[in-house]
Image (cartoon, grey):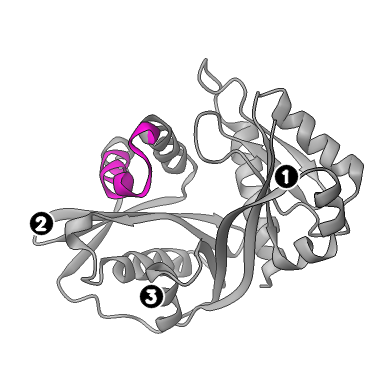
Amino acid sequence: MTSVSVERVEAAFWASFLRNRNVDATSVDDGAVAVAGGYALCATGTFLEYAIGAGSTRALRADDLEVTEDFYATRRLPSRLELTDTVLARDGALFEERGYTDEGIALAVVEATLPLADEETGTIATRISGDRRAWSSLALQAFADTVAPDQSERLRRANAVSAAAASALVIAAIDGIDVGVGAVRLIDDVAFLYAAAVLPAFRGRGVYGALLAARVAFARARGATGAAFKTRADENAERSALRRGFARTALRRRIVRPT
């Protein structure tokens, strides 16, 4: 894999999910529109309200950004894009001209070729769960301290979307107590890992690594030859992955054009 293919895999995964999910009153504005190799994405009332992979196949033009801006304007949202440093450097003059600013979020893309070495997870047990409600409830607790209190409903919706989109949901437990969650989506032979979090009281005990290993094992057993995910740069999730054979392949940043 390359960082470009990871962008396109991630963007296509969410676009396919959003276009094919059952629509109700809360998701009528969900959607995706193609933009220069990527997609502008919207899962209403969640944190997935930005474009991924735009400009991954060619330089962006003003009309590409107009498509993105119109897509979000009809949903009463500002236009946001998550872009690699390469695209930002190449097309920076265009973004500046249209009034985009950096939101200050640096994300590392990390990838690995499978198989990785099997990992001993000690007393941490992991299991595949088919109970979306239980997984989402635990995810809400595990992610709660990562968002502002007034974002709790957005977080709840985001967890429900993550659960619905997954090929598998993983729960980690210590001494019979459920302490962490993670999700994986298989796209062809690539495993996209996402939505991993650990209850605050159990962090620093190897739970994140166990969730990573469990999702990689699930993907490998189903023929995946590569795995990738994104996380905030230089934080514990990235460091844990680097120790387990992943490598950083790109940095991304998010930019926004205020409404």
Element class at badge 3: helix
Reading the chain from its start, which is encountered first: label 3 or label 1? Answer: 1
- What is the number of callouts on the image? 3
Element class at badge 1: strand
* Residue 191 forms part of the magenta stretch: no
Badge 3 amino acid:
Ser
* Residue 145 forms part of the magenta stretch: yes
Q: Please indicate whether residue 29 sits to the left or right of residue 143 in the image.
A: right
- Residue 103 location (% of width, % of height): 60, 51
Reading the chain from its start, which is encountered first: label 1 or label 2? Answer: 1
Give the CA separation, mark 3 to mark 1: 29 Å
Q: From the image, tell me which residue sits under label 3.
A: 240
- The answer to whether residue 34 is visible is yes
Give the CA separation, mark 1 to mark 2: 41 Å
Q: From the image, tell me which residue sits under label 1.
A: 39
- Residue 6 location (% of width, % of height): 65, 63
Badge 1 amino acid:
Tyr
Observer-nearest of 201 and 12: 201
- Residue 180 location (% of width, % of height): 26, 56
Which of the two marks, 1 or 2, is nearer to us in this view? 1
Q: Does 247 appear above or below 44?
A: below
- The answer to whether residue 224 is visible is no
Element class at badge 2: loop
Query: Badge 3 local density, few (<14 within 10 Å), some, or many (20+)?
Result: some
Which of the two marks, 3 or 2, is nearer to us in this view? 3
Q: From the image, tell me which residue sits under label 2.
A: 176
Residue range in magenta is 135-151
Magenta span main SS: helix
